Image (spheres, rainbow, N blue to C red):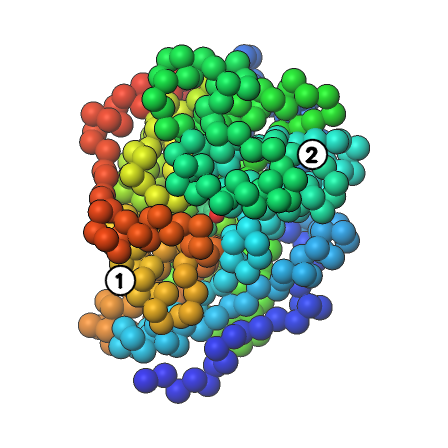
Amino acid sequence: MSERKIPTKLLLEEKELPQYWYNMNAVLPEKHDPPLHPGTLQPCKLEDFEGVFCTELAKQELNVTDEYIPIPEKIKDFYKMIRPSPLIRAYCLEEALGTPAEIYYKFEGNNTSGSHKLNSAIAQAYYAKEQGLKALTTETGAGQWGTALSMACAFFGLDLTVYMVKCSAEQKPFRKTVMETYGAKVYKSPSETTEVGKRILQENPNTTGSLGCAVSEALEAAVKTPNCKYVLGSVLDHVILHQSIIGQETKFALEKYGIEPDLLVSCIGGGSNFGGFVAPFIKDKINGKAKYEIRAVEPKSCPSLTRGKYAYDFGDTGKMTPLLKMYTLGSGFVPSPNHAGGLRYHAMNPIVSKLYHDGYINCTSVEQTSVFEAAVKFAKTEGILPAPESSHSIKVVIDEALKCKKTGEKKKIVFCLTGTGYFDLNAYAQYNNKTMTDYIPTDEDLEKSFATIPDIPQNK
Ligand SMILES: *Cc1c(COP(=O)(O)O)cnc(C)c1O
């Protein structure tokens, strides 16, 4: 079908690696509302973030002026081992679909964490080390972030404690083994090791856990441990900043090979890979110069953009974080345990939320079984077993490519294949033996979790 004038792998050389991270906050025509201190309800100052976060990361979080932020040499050296990641033309998938569309994917799964998470983990561990810290704490949902940070902490010689959402820990016991192999301490969350964990367990002894709850535990542990800070793998603006390496490489490669995209697609959990993937494309979108559409994909079971409220909310169940203006289902939202993999967070990064609110990006929500159907189709044609998260994008990409088959349109579709699914075999087994179910929260379910959004003047 395709004439293959374009190579299968649209490679960049090491010297073409981006030298800067791209800061969308510097180019948004209207800034998103600032993070608020939960006590005073005043915009957060650097000191408010420094209590729990590394100073340099807190500075990046609040930086709304510098469009380009230089990547430190040591981080670039680490990136060189895993990057540039390949941009791949999915010729075999195109052929299987019989579509005239061109499909490209940026593959971020080629490291032990199996995802893009290492791009930010290595940066965050670096700044912690530079600041003279000895330890970090974090939460992990599906486990990729915990793994990535374990790798980064091992590299820089930092201690790490990970709170892993209970149901994921039970679905994926080997994730724990990988993290421990890299030297991390891993607890199932909620755990008995923190006050907030004990409280949540008392209130609801059978809870399967949630990311919001694991964040609370990791925050508490960081505050109580000397020379220790808390780090987060998604949701915050500085994480998206680090992930902009993905979008820049994608843009460089597309330009190098003369490809003008029509549609950019990626999945959203907390928004980090999506934000990073689209970052360098946003300016043209804002200026009205871009002819491409930008599309986020979320699960119907955790629909923060498509059904959430745009409001100030906490990032965690224990209500300890600064308040962020974002699309949220309420920090009390606990996704159904039948939902596999990541993309289970109750809210969405403030930049991604703002872009959606202002109409620069679209969002589609998809059901779990249809996602796995797409995943299997991709696995059979492209030689990679995709992560369930990434497969949300694959579902939308396949649907778009099939539309092109009807219309004859030669759309150029580019998506971010965020990771691999080797630790998600329980979910694949459920799909294969047809025990996988779909779950869509009812309006009443959502009303309950919306009730946990803080009742403050800014939300009126
Ligand atoms: C964490 C993760 C996601 C979702 O998180 P974002 O912060 O929204 O990018 C998607 N895919 C994979 C493979 C992940 O590990």
Amino acid bearing label 1: Asp
Residues tagged 2 and 1 counted as in contact (Cβ below 8 A)? no
Whether disc 1's CB lies below 8 Å from ligand 1 is answered no
Using the rendered image of the protein, determine whether residue 149 is visible from the camera's viewpoint: no
Q: Which mark is residue 311?
A: none
Residue at which label 1 appears = 399
Q: Write the residue at 54% across / 67% down.
A: 86
Q: Quadrant of the N terminus?
A: bottom left
Q: Is residue 327 above or below residue 363?
A: above
Query: What residue is drawn where x is 53% and y is 29%?
Result: 187
Label 1 neighbourhood size at 10 Å, few (<14), some (14-19), many (20+)?
A: some
How busy is the neighbourhood of tag 2: few (under 14 within 10 Å), some, or many (20 plus)?
some
In-image side of 231 versus 444 (left or right): right
Residue closest to the eye, 121 or 69: 121
- Which label lies toward us, 2 or 1? 2
Does label 2 or label 1 sit earlier along the sequence? 2
Query: Considering the numbered disc 1 on the image, is that residue within a helix, a strand or a loop?
Result: helix
Residue 209: x and y in percent read 40, 28
Q: Secondary structure at mark 2?
A: strand
Residue at 64 percent of width and 20 percent of height: 223
Relative image position of residue 108 (x, y in whole percent): 52, 58
The residue identified by callout 2 is 159
Q: Position of residue 53 (x, y in %)?
A: 65, 29
Is 188 displayed left or right of 160 in the figure? Answer: left
Task: Give the CA distance from mark 2 to mark 1.
Answer: 44 Å
Residue 247 falls in image quadrant: bottom right
Residue sitting at x 69%, y 48%: 69
Disc 2 residue lies near ligand 1 with CB under 8 A:
no
Q: Position of residue 382 (x, y in %)?
A: 40, 70
In the image, what residue type sits under mark 2?
A: Asp
